[in-house]
Amino acid sequence: MGRGKIEIKKIENATNRQVTYSKRRNGLFKKAQELTVLCDAKVSLIMFSNTGKFHEFLSPNITTKGFFDLYQKTSGIDLWNSHYERMQENYRRLKEINKKLRREIGRQRMGGDLNELNIKELQALEAKMDSALLAIRERKYYAIKTQTDKHKKKVRNLEERHANLVLDLEAKLERQDGIVENGGYYESAMGVAANGASNSLYALRLYQNHQPQFILQHGTNDLRLA
């Protein structure tokens, strides 16, 4: 006996409907593959079951993007441009709503536009303001602490530099004390004085300009150079 025809209408039984969908889907995929191999055709099938499950077949000789690019070129429809325009329009709409809400919230936080708010909305606004005030104070204290720590660190660095400079100066003075004690500077000054009063005066002035003032104590006598 021949196979009877079935009426084309929705299958009410969920199990039978799913079985029929699976069988016919596989049959379509098989036919699409045959067309691809026999005729070198570019075939794309996209299916969604009534449960939202996605199934797709695409010829191996083309990519999904290439298939849609070919469709746009053949049909003259720019799918991406229309989609982009819809996204841009939705973005502008959401941006305007956000701007409006920000203005309203800003005025309410400044004490304006409160007449239309009920007691619950006023309590919620008060709670938000308290929370915002707490966050601002925490941020302020953190900023103050950060600046204080930074300045303390600078002060410590300057104190260390000052201590190092003092140590270097004391070391230089000790070396110069030894030179004077050995008669180095004294003998040089006396040698210059023997060459004449004018040359001696110039040499001593030059010596004064280039040497630091210091005092050496030897017992009860002081040796002062200026």
Image (cartoon, rainbow, N blue to C red):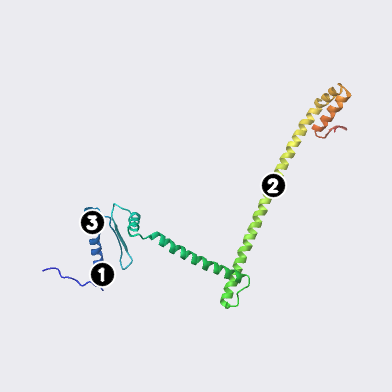
Q: Residue at left 68%, top 48%?
A: 154
| Among the two numbered marks 2 and 1 on one chain, the one whose residue lies closer to the N terminus | 1
Q: Residue at left 80%, top 25%?
A: 184
Q: Amino acid at mark 3?
A: Leu
Can you tell which mark lies on residue 35? 3
Q: Decide which of 29, 149 is in the foreground and name it.
A: 29
Mark 3, secondary structure of its residue: helix
Quarter of the rendering containing residue 113: bottom right
Q: Decide which of 192, 8 is in the foreground and name it.
A: 8
**Residue 199, above or below 19:** above
Q: Mark 1 to mark 3: distance in Å?
A: 27 Å
Q: Mark 2 to mark 1: distance in Å?
A: 82 Å
Q: Mark 3 to mark 2: distance in Å?
A: 83 Å
* Furthest residue toward front: 76
Residue 199 x/y as whole percent: 85, 24
Residue 34 x/y as whole percent: 22, 56
The local crowd at label 3, few if under 14, some if 14 to 19, many if 20 or more residues have their Cα within 10 Å, is some
Quarter containing the N terminus: bottom left
Q: Decide which of 163, 211 is in the foreground and name it.
A: 211
Can you tell which mark lies on residue 17? 1
Q: Is residue 93 left or right of residue 67?
A: right
**Residue 6, above or below 148:** below
Quarter containing the C terminus: top right
The reply to whether discs 1 and 3 touch (Cβ–Cβ < 8 Å) is no
The local crowd at label 2, few if under 14, some if 14 to 19, many if 20 or more residues have their Cα within 10 Å, is few
The local crowd at label 1, few if under 14, some if 14 to 19, many if 20 or more residues have their Cα within 10 Å, is few
Q: Residue at left 62%, top 61%?
A: 138
Mark 2, secondary structure of its residue: helix
Can you tell which mark lies on residue 156? 2
Quarter of the rendering containing residue 164: top right
